[in-house]
Amino acid sequence: MKPSVIPGFGLTFGYTILYLSLLVLIPIAGLFLKAATTPWPQIVRIATAPRTINALEISFGSSLIAALVNVLFGVIVAWVLVRYKFPGRRILDAIVDLPFALPTAVAGIALSTLYAPKGWIGSLFSDKGPLWQWWHAQTWLPFGLEQFSLNFKIAYTPTGIVIALIFVGLPFIVRTVQPVLEEFEQELEEAAATLGANRWQTIAKVILPRLTPALLTGFALAFARAVGEYGSVIFIAGNLPNISEIAPVLIVIKLEEFDQAGAAVIAGIMLIISFAMLLVVNLIQAWARRRFGNV
Amino acid sequence: MKKTARILALGGLVAALALTGAVTARAQDQTLLNVSYDPTRELYEQFNEAFAKHWKDTTGGNVTIEQSHGGSGKQAQAVIDGLGADVVTLALEGDINAIVTKSGLIDENWRAEFPNNSTPYTSTIVFLVRKGNPKAIADWGDLVKDGVEVITPNPKTSGGARWNYLAAWAYANKASGGDEAKDVDFIKQLYKHVPVLDTGARGSTVTFAQKELGDVLLAWENEAYLVLDEFGAENFDIVYPPSSIRAEPPVAIVDKNVEAHGTQALAKAYLEYLYSPEGQTIAARNHYRPSDPSVVTDPALVAAFPKIDLISIDDPLFGGWKTAQPKHFGDGGIFDQVYTPAQ
């Protein structure tokens, strides 16, 4: 190999490989080796069982929704923190990191207590709660719309899962978008305005293109984090098979049956899907960088 | 860099000191690790204190007892994976059997080692309802009435939940006259009334007592009393169904580990002490049914346990854990069928 301009390649590369091997590659290889001890027909049976498929759908579906919601609201949070000066901004800024630091079980218990049918927020949305009564009192609505029963149960439904995942994913978006926003030259937006762009055009043509790579990174991080989340979700999900049971719960169930190979099979499937999705995100990102320039 | 080196050296020194401290302390002091399941926390807190005193009085040695609590199956897995338990006091015979077959750490005849199939105390499953029992729940059949919400954990992940399930099964079997199709149907009906499947018994208790979800909690007898103590007796009532199950949480010495630790005599004395008048009284005080009520020092404690019809897991209906576990809770077993969506 051609000697590099920067010395120390051998040392740092060796260190990188060792570090990654001990912490990431060997455990994951072990997982696949364990899964491989399962005979093929059984792998297929586990992978195609309706319950497994439902759990995977719930896991990846709610992670996707949560990551998308975070993209939208995370950008707004980052925008507010970067562009406006107001008292308590530093504190608000620090609060964004809390979901990183808080044990997820604590978050799950707090969220489920709030959003349970008898909780502060959950009670507003519960059956025959204030919101329900308000809705059914709207007799002016056409077509008897107010007759439609609103059931806004949050905790112990898939909605609860999404809420928990939004919570754990929020800092990823804010923290990836924030530094990019800080580097923005406001002159560009002013230039756009002087050239006659309205506000939506400025957002769509000037701001968003340069934010896209950071947004994709944040999205991928938040999504990956959500797929693997267990601690907070089990408290708010209800864990009903086929309805609100996430794939990691299914893995724990297999482990409780002392069926490590079965657990490894499901974990392997999750890893493969996650890897494929992250690869796609990376490809889009590479495309976005080419398209919008390296930011 | 220099600073880091100094900190490292200091850390090494502290570790070495701690280690020598541990070694010298070991000469007269012993440590025992009891790996147990979730609801026994309070029981063993009191028992360990009593045993340490007893050990000091009889042998003069100091003993420190460490406790580990968690879901019964998870705890068994941890012991299999190398958690150095001296004794295990788990919720299910099946979990100890798993340690036997998966790791060989426990002798396979462990059930014969202590009296009463190595079960020093038993428990049963009762109903905890909201004050005044507004849904009038008196028996298992009432759980499937319209509008009743039942809180019970997932039997796949919780030992206690398996007893709940089996108690319901025993009721259904008696009601149907042994028609298994009807029993399965009752179980299906029952779990349709369960809005949340927590992963452990404590999780369900919190869901019911703190988050105020559901009309009835299927709970260990001792856990139900604990809720009265913790969340206020003015909010809940305990209902004893006419029939329930005799839950037998067994104990065992982890033979290979005590050999390695040199704690054979200590571990044996520890578990034997559970059967002593003192041990049985502590169990009764914590609402576990003593296996030998005659030795309990305070007869009022024994009288406080209502007499209800209790079926054992060794009854022909279940045929012991080795038969019941795969049939009901195994992969594709009856409980899995409950949640198989209609094709």
Image: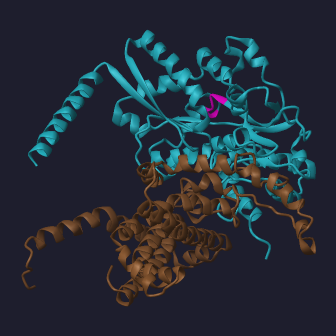
Chain colours: A brown, B cyan
> Which image quadrant for residue B222?
top right
Give the side of residue B287 with respect to residue B274, left or right. right
Q: Nearer the viewer, residue A97 or A41?
A: A97
Image position, residue A135 (x, y; %): 85, 61
Residue B316 in sight in this render: no
Residue located at (41% from left, 51% from top): A90
Please say whether residue B118 is one of the residues in the magenta stretch.
yes
The stretch in magenta equals B117-121
Residue located at (56% from left, 48% from top): B73
Image position, residue B49 (x, y; %): 50, 18
Please say whether residue A100 is one of the residues in the magenta stretch.
no
Residue A267's place in the image compared with B66, above or below, is below
Residue located at (85% from left, 37% from top): B243
Residue B259's place in the image compared with A247, above or below, is above
Residue B178's place in the image compared with A265, above or below, is above
Q: Nearer the viewer, residue A270 or A112?
A: A112
- Number of numbered tags placed on the structure image: 0
Image position, residue B61 (x, y; %): 37, 15
Q: Nearer the viewer, residue A36 or B42?
A: B42
Residue located at (66% from left, 24% from top): B286
Give the side of residue A236 with respect to residue A67, left or right. right
In which quadrant of the rendered image does the C terminus of chain B lie? bottom right
Give the side of residue B29 with respect to residue A135, left or right. left
